[in-house]
Image (cartoon, rainbow, N blue to C red):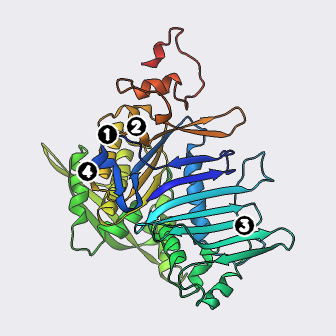
Amino acid sequence: MIIYFSVQNFRSLRDKITLDFRATPNSELAEYYIQEFPDLKLKLLKMAMIFGKNASGKTNILRALDFLRNSILQQDTDKNKPTGIQPFALDKDKNSVFDLKFVHEDIVYQYQLTLNQTIIVKEHLHYWPKGTKTRVFTRDLQKLVKEAEYKYNWSGSKANKTLIENLELTVPNQSVLASLKKYNYTGPMQQVYSWFKDTLAPIVEPNTSLIPWNLHNFLNSTEPCNYKDFYVQQLQIADFIISNITVKKEEVALTDIPLNSALKYLINAIEKDNNKMPETVERIDILLSHKVADGEFILNLEEESAGTQRFFEFCGFLCWMQQTNKIIPIDEIERAMHEDLIEHFIASYLTYAKKSQLILTSHNSSILNMKDIIRRDTIWITDRLESGATELSRLTQYPIKKEHSIANLYRKGLIGGKPDIGNIGSDGSDES
């Protein structure tokens, strides 16, 4: 689980901002929101919700986390390739800084990365294996010689001289952690690499299609538990008249596939058949049975409403949470979903999740009024300063009382993040 994530000089995040998952001293919904680590003296929240107007920078916080993940997982030995960092437009000559502290298998890790558009300037990894901060490695660019100096310190590192020598050959625009895949190694660096790969999920953008992922991981799963029944149950609770789900597979001629879907099927088929052009492709249809008073009818998932499709996709996350721990960043949770569906998804997530975390962005202020399921220290507000930079504040920084409507305060601009469009009426009657 993430303890905190800080970033500076990335897109609109000009000044350092910190998204902190440490819970405040508040018993509100604690049994659903808080995961305790007694030995580490930590109480971490399972969710963070970032609200803000369009172009206020809320998405850039998720993109920053995603950039850090990709920097570690993507391997490239071309030392002349740019790092891919996108600094603030007026600070392109300055370094960008990332600082991530998290818990993995009851051990605290801290990974810090400083880079510019050309090279990695600093890369530090520390951990607390027995409650004491211990250096795993540090890598610092020496300006005079233009070479990186490495310092390693972990149990067994002295005996692993070959690994150290190999890692010191890491090209200057690549993370040391990204080099690990080439070597047979187990230890704290591999634990951190695995956390980025297996625990931290890629950003889910508004147009990200999750249907193939749902099919592969759950609806086509050979696991003994019946995921299909879980999907049906969730859709029914969400007030859909769905009684069954059927996955239909068949080989069809490529010419029989509608043009708007042909490219997707073609790409999948070519990848499976060693880049050869196929004559037929496997067509997969997800059919939803609807039971109503007059009988039953079947619709292809593609014929369902956008909200039904989106909630169907999110059911996979609820399955995920029951079997493993993940960190899932979702941009614009309200895309195609009514607020009641959003409330049901959040409530279901909090019920099924164990040591997982959900990071959501939204500009739908009605979510702020879901008092029964929203804990106040999970709410963050982004605002755009006159310089164009993003400011991030936590709701608990404001003197808000329990009887206050957070949504109304947000709409009035009293807690930031409100579009500057002026009042509809001179008496402020637009605030309801």
Is disc 1 in contact with disc 2, using a CB cutoff of under 8 Å?
yes
Say whether residue 79 is visible.
no
What separation in Å lies between label 2 and label 3 (alpha carbons)? 37 Å
Q: Earlier in the sequence, mark 1 or mark 4?
A: 1
Placement of 379 over or under 291, stated as above or below = above
Task: Identify the element where label 2 is drawn.
Answer: helix
What separation in Å lies between label 1 and label 2 (alpha carbons)? 9 Å
* Residue highlighted by disc 3: 120
* Residue highlighted by disc 2: 376
Please provide percent x and percent y for residue 210: 42, 59
Residue 235: mark in rendering: 4
From the viewer's side, name the closer residue of 325 and 345: 325
Q: Amino acid at mark 3?
A: Ile
Please provide percent x and percent y for residue 386: 70, 32
* Residue highlighted by disc 1: 28
Q: Earlier in the sequence, mark 4 or mark 3?
A: 3
Task: Choose mark 1 or mark 4, whichever is in front.
Answer: 1
Task: Identify the element where label 4 is drawn.
Answer: helix
